[in-house]
Image: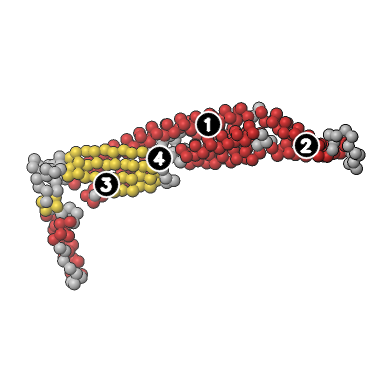
Amino acid sequence: MIYSMTGYASATRELAAAGATGGGISVSVELRTVNSRFLDLNFRMPEDVRVCEPTLRELLMNKLSRGKVDIRINLQRSEQTSNAGTLNTDVLAQLAQLEQAVLESFPGAERMRTGEILRWPGVLAESNVSPEDLREAVLVCGRQAVTELIDVRAREGSQLATMLLTNVAEMEAIVQRITPLVPELIAKHQQKIVERLQEALGIAAPDAAATIVSREEIAERIRQEVTMYGIRIDIAEELSRLTAHLNETRHVIEKGGKVGKRLDFMMQELNREANTLGSKAAAKELADSSMTLKLLIEQMREQVQNLE
């Protein structure tokens, strides 16, 4: 299985209050992921459930290896909460002790204002849902959202793998099509070079004046130049390496797993051979094939960036 690094998942859980007159809380966990070189986790959550962050972080690190992940946890209080605004006496007592300790060390410090006290996290008991139940609900939603996210990334990864294999097959067809043509194309190009050199040296004309260098020496020199040029434009080695790289790319995709970085490396190797093929192209057919290969490789590179 190949996994994409992009995806979205969410889970919601309703918590009823402990008392009959209390209001409940709706807990939701949202996960959004995009591509990234490494695993980057960003949490946005109320302070009430900040204690859940280490557990959720460990869960995500065990399931994901790459990608930027935004984790958003929302707590929606019931509008019918009958005890909204009730003071949490335990938190008030702790806050008073903290303030007294500060004043003993800094006698000149100002005392907290009423508004500041009321805004302190946990001072207002907005529901009868226990902190333990709230944290458990967040973790349950988190696990459910992670499972859904992995399924989403797997489905998109499967689609990307199909597209990549289609491009690989198209490139393999191009290589198979041009490989038998290479000797003939090189021979034709060499013949053109021979004719032009012969014409430039006057060998093609039967009544040409005698030269200091014999015809045999000139013909040998032409043969050497054409042979060297034929070696420079021979692309058999590039085609062989392209075939090997395409075979390896197909193998990596079909094997699956965390293939993003390996496939990114294979795209670099394929692009290098396609560029060399274009620079050596001695015929329009080869130049056009090189351009098509580079376009297909670029399409694959863009999609490979999204793979885990």
Query: Which residue has dot 4 on it?
Result: 5
Give the mark nearest the N terminus, 4 or 1: 4
Q: Which mark is residue 168?
A: 1
Neighbourhood count class around disc 2 (C-alpha, 10 Å): few under 14, some 14–19, many 20 upward: few
Hey, what amino acid is under mark 2?
Arg
Residue identified by numbered label 3: 52
CA–CA distance in space, label 3 to label 1: 45 Å
* Marks 2 and 4 close (CB-CB < 8 Å): no
Image height of 110 relative to 183, above or below:
below
Give neighbour class at mark 1: few <14, some 14-19, many 20+ (Cα, 10 Å): many
Q: For the residue carrying disc 4, how many other residues have a C-alpha within 10 Å: few (<14), some (14-19), or many (20+)?
A: many
Determine whether label 1 and label 2 are within 8 Å by CB.
no
Q: Secondary structure at mark 1?
A: helix
Badge 3 element: helix
Q: Pick the quarter of the image with the C terminus.
A: top left
What's the distance in space between the residues labelled 2 and 4, CA to CA?
Answer: 57 Å
Along the line of sight, which residue is nearer the eye, 305 or 290?
290
- Residue drawn at (32%, 41%) of the image: 31
> Residue at label 2?
196
Q: Give the secondary structure at mark 2.
A: helix
Report the Cα–Cα distance between label 4 and label 3: 24 Å
Proximity of marks 4 and 1: CB atoms separated by less than 8 Å: no
In terms of sequence position, does the residue under pointer 1 or pointer 2 come before the other?
1
